[in-house]
Amino acid sequence: MSTTDVSPAAAPQLGHALKPRQLIMMGLGSAIGAGLFLGSGVGVQAAGPAVLISYLVAGALVIIVMNALGEMAAAKPASGAFSVYAADAMGATAGATVGWLWWAQLVIVIAAESVGAAGLLATVWPQIPVPLSSLTFMLVFTAINLMGVRNFGEFEFWFAILKVVAILLFIVIGAALLLGLLPGVASPGLSNVTGHGGFAPKGWAGIGAALLVVVFAFGGTEIVAVAAAETSDPSRSLARAIRTVAWRILVFYIGSISVIIAVVPWTSESLRSPFAAVLEVARIPYASTTITLIAVIALLSALNANLYGASRMIFSLAQREEAPRWLARVNRRQVPVIAVLSCVVFGFVATVFELWYPNRVLPVLLNIVGSTCLLVWTISLVSQLILRRRADRAGTPLPFRMRGFPWLTVSALAILALIFALLVSSAETRGQFLSMAALTAGIALASELARRYRNSKRAQ
C-alpha cells in the first residue's frame, strides 16, 4: 500500500456532491481572474503584440499540466491531489512539502483577494468602507464553504458563468469594432499590430519578460484535481473537464488578448485597464465601472475557490498525519469545518493587518509565495513522469491517459526550467524566487523532522 493511502475506516471522508458541470466551470473560472481583466495590460506593454506568443506558450504549459494532473487524479482521486501524487512518486516529505507550500500560498492569496476586491469596489462606491467590505467578503465566503461542497460548487459555477459571458461579449464587441460594424467608430485594422515598432518591438527579451507576467495568470487551474475527489464519478468528470476546459482557456485568453492588441496601441497608458480601454474605444458607456465590477466578481470567485482548495489540502495533510489530526474532522454534511476555519483565521488576521498598514503586509507575503504555482506544476509533472512509467511497467490500466507522453511532460518541464531561469536572471524577480526556495527548504526540513519525531514516539 502507498504511504498516502488512507482506508475509509481510518479517517473521515468528504462527500461526493460536486456535479460535472460545476467541475468544468470551476476549472474554467479558476483560470479567468482579475489577472486577465486588469493585469493583462502589463504583459502587452512588456512585449507589444508579440505577447500573443507568451500567452500561447503559457497556455500550452497549462494544458499539459492539466492533462498530467488529470491522468493522476482519474487513477487516484484525492483531496490532496498533487500533494498525494508527489508522496506516492517521491516520498512523504515531497508530498507534505508541496501540500504545505500550496496551502500557504492560498491562505495568503485569500487575504489579498478580499482586500483587493474591497478596494476595487470602493472605486465605484467610495461610500462603502474598504475594511467593512473586506471583512464582509471573508465572512460570506466562509459561510458558503461551511454550507457544503454542493453549495460551494453552485456559487462557483455562477461566478464562472458571469466571467465567461463577460469575456464572450468583450470578444464580440472587439470583433465588431475591428470589422467596422460599430456605428461612428472607425476600425484601426491591423495598424496597432504592425505599427509602433512592429509585432515584436522588444524582441525575444520582451516576449520572455511578458511570459513571466502572463504565466501567473493561469495559476489556480490545479484546483480541478483537488475538486475532482468530491464528484460522484471522478474519473469520467475529470476527463470531461480536462477536454473542455483546455481549449476554452486558450480561446478566451487568446481571443481577448488579440482584441486588445488590435484595438489599443501597446504604448498606450490606458492599458492599465485593458478591457476598459477597448470598451471606451468602442464607445460603450460606463466601460470602466463595468470592468471594475467584473474584476471584483473575478476576485471573489478566486477567493471562494482558494478557500475551498486550501481547506481540502489541509484536510488531506491531516489525514496523512502531516498536519494535526483534528483538522481532518468532518460534520454531518461531510464538510471539514475545522479545516475551513483554520484557513480563514490567517486570512482574517492578514486582512486586518493589511487594512491597518496598507501595502505593507500582503505585498511582502505575496512576494514570498509568488512563484509557488510554478513549483507545484513542476512537482506535478515530475510525479506524473514517475507514476506513469511505474504504471506502464506494472501493466496497470489507467482510466485517463495523457497523450504525447513522455515528450509533452518533458517539454513542459523544459518550459518551466526556462521560466525559473528568467526569474533568477531578473533583478526584479530574483528575490521572489530565492524567498520561495528558502520557504520550500524550510517546510521540507520541518516536515522531515516532524515525521522522524512521530516515528520515534511510535517506536518507544
Image (cartoon, rainbow, N blue to C red):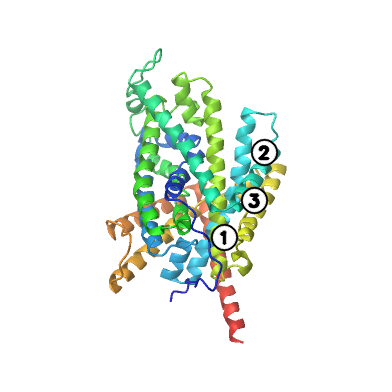
Label 2, secondary structure: give it: helix
Q: Which residue is label 1 attached to?
A: 334
Badge 2 amino acid:
Ser
Badge 3 amino acid:
Gly
Q: CA distance from mark 3 to mark 1?
A: 23 Å
Q: Which residue is label 2 attached to?
A: 133
Q: CA distance from mark 2 to mark 1?
A: 30 Å
Q: Nearer the viewer, residue 253 or 44?
A: 253
Labels 2 & 1 near each other (Cβ < 8 A): no
Residue furthest to the right in view is: 356
Q: Which mark is residue 278?
A: none
Task: From the top left corner, tell me how far across and down residue 440 is, in percent.
Answer: 53, 62
Q: Is residue 65 visible?
A: no
Mark 3 crowd level (few <14, some 14–19, many ≥20, 10 Å Cα): many
In front of the other: label 3 or label 1? Answer: 1
Q: Which mark is residue 347?
A: 3
Task: Report whether 254 appears left or right of 305.
Answer: left
